[in-house]
Image (spheres, rainbow, N blue to C red):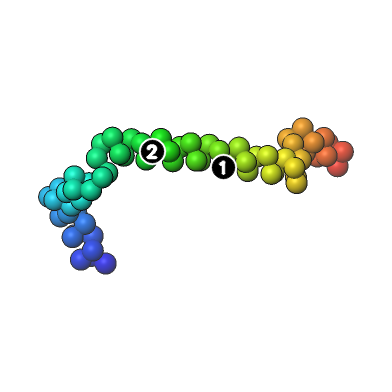
Amino acid sequence: MEIMITSFITWLKDESGFEIFERSVLTKGGIIIAVGVGSIVLSLSGGEYTRIENEFIGSEEEANETLRRFH
């Protein structure tokens, strides 16, 4: 385990490990596009999850009303 940590620290300080980003398509623009697409996907999946949750579990108002009935 210690060997892995020391090799990672060496790789991080040396910065030669970052050459993969320079050689591949993942340049600064590509990384920005990837982050943008990822955030859109997360936003859409979050909205879809909320829709499914409201359909099967109920909205927050319904949940609060149910809790009030039991207390």
In space, the residues marked 2 and 1 are separated at their CA atoms by 15 Å
Indicate the amino acid at tag 1. Ser
* Corner quadrant of residue 49: top right
Which residue is disc 2 drawn over?
35
The spot of residue 50 in percent (x, y) is 65, 39
Q: Which mark is residue 70?
A: none
The reply, left or right, for residue 39 in relation to residue 26 is right
Q: Earlier in the sequence, mark 2 or mark 1?
A: 2
For disc 2, the neighbor class at 10 Å (few under 14, some 14 to 19, many from 20) is: few
Under tag 1, what secondary structure? helix
In the picture shown, does residue 3 fall above or below 27?
A: below
Q: Which residue is mark 1?
A: 45
Label count reads 2
Q: Position of residue 61 (x, y in %)?
A: 77, 32
- Quarter the C terminus occupies: top right
Horizontally, residue 52 falls left or right of residue 62, namely left
Q: Secondary structure at mark 2?
A: helix
Image position, residue 13 (x, y; %): 15, 48
